[in-house]
Image (cartoon, helix red, strand yellow):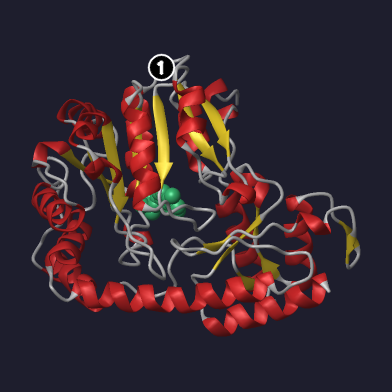
């Protein structure tokens, strides 16, 4: 069957593909260490599951009026309490995960020829979603030598050509975070332009050491009318399978996104919304989130230290999210076991096939020198996988 040119231009998600291959090998009985996954390994906290079960038992199984009305009010409270952001419920839309919110935002703001600034390395879905909306990505390269961060100069050099800037902080795949000062400097640069900012803050709670998180839109009151803040429950509350995310921004954009959703997905799952409502309003939440954060911090530090001690590996310290993104390019051009390695694709393939360790090639994120390892897996797995990697590289 002849498929549309729209879908033919889109790459399937490399991270999901790597995960599928690792799962297939596990199903064959192989002892695979999976550093490919981008999801917390913890169960969703009990009180959230209990709220969703209670909603199901109470018959909360129908279409919900407007997308997530009660939940929207709780999100408005959360934004005020935790992010110093003032919104009303007509400025919030609840979606099927943060990915869906981003997708719909590109759909309502882009048009053929409209360009989007995407700092590279980037989360795999941004460029593909831009293309699906008829837009064009412009990549702003960073690299380990710049700590994987863009500067105001990088932004201003290309701002005239673009409509939107995507700012993902903390970052997937690099694990780096912008300091409040760096973010403020970027905000000042943005205010000199006509750019709309997509602030993807889905990893806001996963920050380490003395890292401070601030919401981009809170840095200047003029940013409110040109920023969309994206977030969701997947990473903070270990709720990836629930598919709940949201966006806050100018009411006209939110209304357009709601119109699109009304012809597309109607409302987010009714009883999942009840779980999310508990996540944002139950006082038990903070301690649960903090326990998960602390464990990620311990694992991330260990993984980073061990990677940096390996032959030909150099890794920027992750201060957020749950990824290490080491530069392994010193190994390109040599053989790892049986396989000749020319780039990150070969490197990842050698890891998976020869030592049964799944990592994601940096090429998928626009940085071929690196590979991504997730530390959203248990400490035993981390030690075992890194033992194997050390041996392969040594
Ligand atoms: C940077 C970033 N943004 C958004 C998302 C979307 O997550 P979800 O659709 O599960 O809310 C992800 C998930 O991996 C991510 O890494």
Judging by the rendered image, the residue that carries numbered circle 1 is 111
Residue farthest top in this picture: 113
Quarter occupied by residue 357:
bottom right
Q: Position of residue 69 (x, y in %)?
A: 10, 47
Asked if residue 321 lies left or right of residue 89, the reply is: right
At 19% from the left and 58% from the top, the residue drawn is 82
At 33% from the left and 60% from the top, the residue drawn is 212
Question: In the picture shown, does residue 217 fall above or below 49?
Answer: above
Quadrant position of the N terminus in the picture: top right
Q: Position of residue 143 (x, y in %)?
A: 62, 46
Along the line of sight, the residue nearer the viewer: 31 or 202: 202
Question: In the picture shown, does residue 310 fall above or below 96?
Answer: below
Disc tally is: 1
Quarter occupied by residue 41:
bottom left
Q: Position of residue 324 (x, y in %)?
A: 57, 63
Decide if residue 45 is in sight here. Answer: no
Q: Position of residue 117 (x, y in %)?
A: 48, 30
At 49% from the left and 35% from the top, the residue drawn is 118
Quarter occupied by residue 280:
bottom left
Circle 1: is it few (<14), some (14-19), or many (20+) Cα within 10 Å?
A: some
Look at the numbered disc 1 and give the secondary structure of its residue: loop
Along the line of sight, the residue nearer the viewer: 309 or 253: 309
Along the line of sight, the residue nearer the viewer: 364 or 329: 329
Question: In the picture shown, does residue 216 fall above or below 136?
Answer: below
């Amino acid at each position: 069957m002849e498929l549309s040119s729209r879908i033919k231009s889109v790459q399937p998600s490399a991270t999901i593909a790597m995960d599928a291959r690792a799962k297939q090998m596990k199903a064959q009985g192989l002892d695979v260490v999976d550093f490919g996954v981008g999801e917390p390994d913890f169960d969703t906290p009990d009180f959230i599951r209990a709220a969703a079960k209670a909603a199901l038992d109470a018959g909360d199984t129908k279409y919900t009026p407007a997308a997530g009305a009660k939940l929207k009010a709780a999100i408005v409270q959360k934004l005020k309490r935790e992010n110093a952001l003032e919104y009303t419920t007509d400025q919030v839309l609840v979606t099927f995960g943060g990915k869906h919110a981003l997708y719909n935002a590109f759909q309502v703001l882009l048009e053929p020829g409209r360009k989007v600034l995407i700092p590279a390395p980037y989360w795999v879905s941004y460029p593909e979603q831009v293309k699906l909306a008829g837009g064009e990505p412009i990549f702003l390269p960073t690299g380990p030598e710049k700590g994987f961060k863009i500067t105001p100069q990088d932004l201003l050099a290309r701002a005239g050509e673009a409509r939107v800037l995507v700012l993902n902080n903390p970052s997937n795949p690099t694990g780096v975070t912008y300091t409040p000062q760096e973010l403020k400097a970027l905000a000042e640069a943005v205010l000199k332009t006509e750019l709309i900012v997509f602030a993807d803050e889905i990893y806001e709670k996963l920050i380490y050491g003395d890292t401070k998180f601030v919401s981009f839109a809170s840095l200047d009151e003029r940013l409110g009318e040109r920023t969309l803040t994206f977030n969701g429950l997947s990473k903070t509350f270990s709720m990836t399978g629930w598919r709940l995310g949201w966006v806050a921004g100018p009411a006209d954009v939110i209304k357009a996104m709601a119109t699109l959703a009304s012809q597309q997905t109607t409302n987010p799952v009714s009883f999942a919304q009840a779980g999310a409502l508990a996540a944002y309003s139950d006082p038990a939440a903070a301690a649960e989130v903090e326990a998960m954060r602390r464990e990620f911090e311990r694992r991330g530090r260990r993984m980073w230290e061990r990677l940096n001690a390996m032959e030909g590996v150099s890794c920027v310290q992750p201060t957020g999210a749950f990824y290490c993104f080491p530069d392994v390019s010193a190994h390109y051009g040599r053989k790892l076991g049986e396989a000749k390695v020319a780039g990150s694709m070969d490197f990842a393939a050698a890891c998976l096939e020869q030592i049964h360790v799944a990592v994601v090639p940096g090429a998928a994120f626009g940085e071929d020198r690196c590979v991504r390892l997730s530390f959203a897996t248990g400490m035993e797995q981390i030690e075992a996988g890194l033992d194997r990697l050390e041996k392969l590289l040594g």
